Image: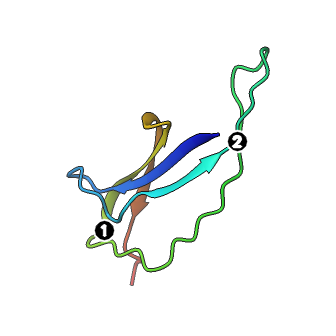
């Protein structure tokens, strides 16, 4: 088992909410360079204070392994 943490971070590096934490059981084979795992998150009541660019950061065993951008834009009137 490996620990997993997902953080939503704003442009200034501040966390939008407490980290989402859990565990995953990943068993890579010797020939695999990459692997995937499906994760379902309950993201109710996230309060983004402003529109802009955010980051979704993934850590496995307390080591940052990846980030993806999240753009929060205002719907045109």
Question: Horizontal placement of 1 versus 6: left or right?
Answer: right
Residue shown at 76% from the left, 20% from the top: 32
Q: Which residue is mark 1?
A: 51
- Taking the view exactly as shown, the residue that stands out farthest to the left is 12
- Taking the view exactly as shown, the residue that stands out farthest to the bottom is 77
Q: Which mark is residue 25?
A: 2
Mark sitting earlier along the chain (1/2): 2
Question: In front here: 45 or 12?
Answer: 45
Q: Give percent across and percent down for residue 50.
A: 26, 71
Quadrant in the picture for the C terminus: bottom left
Q: Give percent across and percent down for residue 57.
A: 43, 46
- Taking the view exactly as shown, the residue that stands out farthest to the top is 31
In the rendered image, the vertical position of residue 5 relative to residue 75, given as above or below: above
Local crowd at mark 2 within 10 Å, few (<14), some, or many (≥20)? Answer: few
Residue shown at 24% from the left, 55% from the top: 14
Task: State how far apart marks 1 and 2 are (Cα).
Answer: 35 Å
In the rendered image, the vertical position of residue 29 relative to residue 27, given as above or below: above
Q: Quadrant of residue 72?
A: bottom left
Q: Give percent across and percent down for residue 45.
A: 43, 80
Frontmost of labels 1 and 2 is: 2
**How many marks on residues?**
2
Question: In front here: 72 or 19?
Answer: 19
Question: Horizontal placement of 42 versus 8: left or right?
Answer: right
Q: Quadrant of residue 26?
A: top right
Secondary-structure class at tag 2: loop
Q: Give percent across and percent down for residue 46.
A: 41, 74
């Amino acid at each position: 088992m490996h620990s997993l943490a997902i953080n939503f971070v704003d442009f200034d590096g501040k966390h939008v909410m407490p980290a989402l934490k859990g565990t995953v059981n990943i068993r890579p084979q010797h020939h695999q360079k990459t692997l995937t795992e499906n994760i379902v998150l309950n993201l109710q009541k996230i309060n983004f204070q402003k529109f802009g660019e955010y980051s979704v950061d993934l850590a496995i065993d307390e080591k940052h392994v990846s980030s993806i951008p999240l753009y929060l834009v205002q719907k045109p009137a």
